[in-house]
Image (cartoon, rainbow, N blue to C red):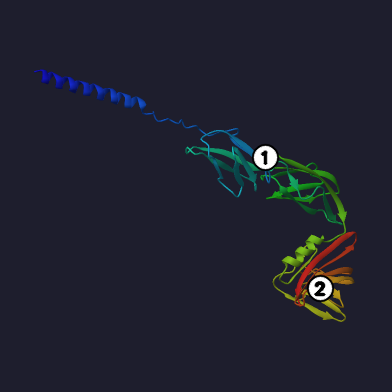
Amino acid sequence: MKTKYFFLSMLSAMALTASFTACSSDDDDPTPEVVESKAITVDTDTLKMDVAATSTFNITDGGGDYKVFSENPEVVTATIDNNTVSVTSLKKGKTGVVISDAQGNYKRVMVQSMYMTMSLDKETVAIGIKLGHTDGRATVTVTAGNGGYTAVVADENIATARVSGDNIVLTAKAKGTTTLTVTDMMGLTKTVPVTVESSSIPYTDEEKQEIVNTLTDNTIVWDGQQSMSWGNYGVVKNGDNNVVTWDYYGYYYFKFNVGPDLTVGTKTNCTVEAKMDWGSPETTYDNVTVEILKNDSKRIWGIAYVIKDNYLHYGYFCMGL
């Protein structure tokens, strides 16, 4: 009987010891630390910057180990140094810069790359009205701006303006001075003075170059009238003169008597004979100046002009040899 009670006492003691041991083990195990996820915050949610400039913003909180990328690297690029993000504008546009951290959080910052000042290809505009004529033209190009342009001329009795993409086409109406104001979609403006003057110059250097660069077919133009696709073109000898001609059986024709040679340069005392209306008489222009702009042995390009009765008559030609 005593033996029975002894074993029961031992079992109770072992159970109690095991109980204390289990409790002690539970108390000794550390509780896993719970890391609270922090949203990424920055000191600006939007970034407005000038084209070709670099701007920065700072990460003020987040999970660390930050990375950054641009949604459109053609508009802006982005780099990061510690908590500072640098954004460089490459061209006009709107995109986003995205930051990520070690906890898988993301933050998007809107970036608007735009021009902060407007620039034009001319600081002043001079338009020549050809002598005796009633209009002249000049083109002003926006070299830095945000699109959606409007153009206003202060005095439309002197000139008017028409917008074509990035170009402002001015048409002169009368001699005088005025101003042109160009405004873009963001409200940027640029104002330049405009002067309209009478001119005896038939073509600018740029217009001469355009004649050479763009004309590849036989063409003659005189006083705004152009030769037709029908008729005979050619360069013929008439005595000592070379004649650049278009002729439709004597009913309509242009005949530019250029002179003894077709070398590049200015020829004086030339003549132009023109008949462009059925039944109308021929009109002859003496003392015409002809400039051969180019002669590549296969084709010639040139202009002709003369002042008669206080009026500038002028034209150009391209002719195969």
Residue 295 is situated, as x and y percent measured from the top left of the image, at 79, 74
Residue type at mark 2 is Lys
Task: In this rendered view, identify the residue nearer to me: 232 or 73.
Answer: 73
Q: Quadrant of residue 222?
A: bottom right
**Is 21 drawn above or below residue 308 in the view shown?**
above
**Is 212 drawn above or below residue 108 in the view shown?**
below
Q: Please tell me which of labels 2 and 1 falls first in the chain.
A: 1
Residue 286 is situated, as x and y percent measured from the top left of the image, at 89, 69
Residue 5 is situated, as x and y percent measured from the top left of the image, at 13, 18
> On residue 255, which mark appears?
2
Task: In this rendered view, identify the residue nearer to me: 229 or 35.
Answer: 35
Q: Residue furthest front?
A: 2
Q: Quadrant of residue 71?
A: top right
Mark 1 packing: few (<14 Cα in 10 Å), some, or many (20+)? some
**Is 160 drawn above or below residue 3 in the view shown?**
below
Q: Element under label 2? A: strand
Task: Tell whether 72 sits left or right of 287.
Answer: left
Q: Residue at x 49, y 39 (%)?
A: 102
Q: Residue at x 79, y 67 (%)?
A: 316
Which is more foreground, mark 2 or mark 1? 1
Q: Which residue is mark 1?
A: 186
Mark 2 packing: few (<14 Cα in 10 Å), some, or many (20+)? many
- The quadrant in which the N terminus is found is top left
Task: In this rendered view, identify the residue nearer to me: 210 or 217.
Answer: 210
Find the distance from the CA under tag 2 to the CA under tag 1.
54 Å
- The quadrant in which the C terminus is found is bottom right
Task: Tell whether 264 sits left or right of 232.
Answer: right
Task: In this rendered view, identify the residue nearer to me: 79 or 170.
Answer: 79
Can residue 319 be spotted in the picture?
A: yes
